[in-house]
């Protein structure tokens, strides 16, 4: 169980890092004109997907936290 939880935490951290990179890329170094609209939309879609997964992980961690300890 501990190994699975550790793996989940690692994946969660990877998704947070990826989301931060997507936000940074979508910002186009402060110039939205530097990134084509289709690419910006793809970044937004990927960020929305990553956000949904992060919410899922957060809910799973909440549920795990509510389980009785053995």
Image: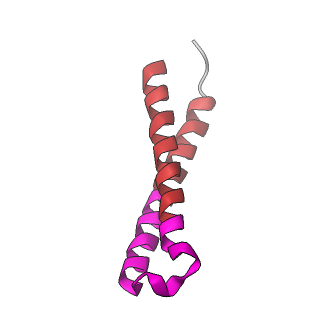
Image location (x, y in percent) of residue 49: 43, 62
x and y percentages locating residue 60 in the rendered image: 52, 40
Residue 50 visible somewhere in the drawing: yes
Q: Any magenta on residue 27?
A: yes
SS majority, magenta = helix
The answer to whether residue 24 is left or right of residue 7 is: right
- Is residue 10 toward the left or the right of residue 59 in the image? left
Q: Quadrant of the C terminus?
A: top right
| Rendered position, 25 above or below 18 | below
* Residue shown at the point (60%, 16%) measured from the top left: 69
- Comparing 36 with 66, the one in front is 36
Residue in front for this viewpoint, 10 or 66: 10
Q: Residue furthest top?
A: 70
Q: Residue at x 46, y 83 (%)?
A: 34
The residue located at (49%, 87%) in the rendering is: 33
The quarter in which the N terminus is drawn is top left
- Specify whether residue 1 is in view: no
* Range of residues picked out in magenta: 23-51
Count all numbered tags in the image, as a single digit. Answer: 0
Question: According to the image, what is the colour scheme of the structure?
Answer: secondary structure
Q: Residue at x 53, y 50 (%)?
A: 16
Q: Quadrant of residue 38?
A: bottom left
Q: Is residue 22 above or below residue 38?
A: above
**Relative to 42, is 68 above or below?**
above
Compared across the picture, whether 67 is left or right of 28 comes to: right
What x and y, as percent, mark residue 55? Answer: 54, 52
């Amino acid at each position: 169980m501990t190994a699975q939880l550790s793996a989940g935490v690692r994946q969660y951290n990877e998704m947070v890092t990826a989301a931060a990179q997507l936000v940074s890329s979508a910002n186009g170094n402060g110039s939205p004109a530097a990134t084509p609209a289709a690419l910006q939309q793809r970044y937004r879609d990927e960020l929305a997907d990553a956000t949904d997964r992060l919410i899922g992980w957060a809910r799973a961690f909440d549920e795990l936290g509510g389980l009785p300890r053995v």
